[in-house]
Amino acid sequence: MHYARDTTSGAEGLALLDMLRAQRPEVPVIVMTAWSTIDLAVEAMRRGASDFITKPWENERVLEVLSKQAFKHHSSRSRAGFSAGCCPVPDSARRA
């Protein structure tokens, strides 16, 4: 996503996070930014982000976070009685 207003405060990303969580609170949201601060990461997690990745990222870390969140989401849907099957979960995520 390309932000038009203030690109360094994180305000637009946090607003997007709020909107996504309001519309689909069960879906994990992973925040990624090049303008990371501890305060921004804490605020994103407080608002419901499932994880926080900083740029430049390490591919292994991104894959680990995605796998972990997909597994958590899959597990919670299974416990809630939803059919799984949209997203296969790699074995590495099951160990996370």
Image (tube, grey):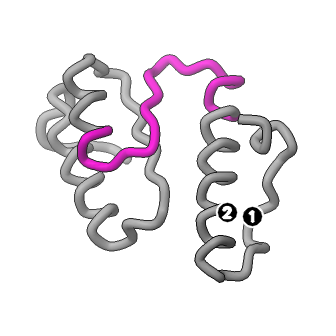
Q: Amino acid at mark 1?
A: Cys
Q: Is residue 49 left or right of 57 when viewed as pictured?
A: left
Q: Position of residue 47 (x, y in %)?
A: 25, 47
Q: Nearer the viewer, mark 1 or mark 2?
A: 2
Q: Residues within 10 Å of mark 1 (few under 14, many from 20)?
A: few
Q: Position of residue 39 (x, y in %)?
A: 20, 22
Residue 79 got which mark? none
Q: Which residue is mark 2?
A: 74
Q: Quadrant of the C terminus?
A: top right
Whether the magenta-drawn stretch holds residue 49 is answered as yes
Q: Which quarter of the picture shows residue 35?
A: top left
Tally the numbered discs: 2
Q: Which residues are magenta?
A: 45-63
Residue found at x 22% / y 45%? 14
Relative to 11, residue 84 above or below: below
Q: Position of residue 3 (x, y in %)?
A: 25, 43
Residue found at x 62% / y 31%? 62
Q: Which quarter of the picture shows residue 41?
A: top left
Q: Which residue is mark 1?
A: 87
Residue found at x 72% / y 81%? 83
Helix, strand or loop at disc 2? helix
Q: Is residue 36 left or right of 69 when viewed as pictured?
A: left
Q: Amino acid at mark 2?
A: His
Helix, strand or loop at disc 1? loop
Q: Is residue 49 left or right of 53 when viewed as pictured?
A: left
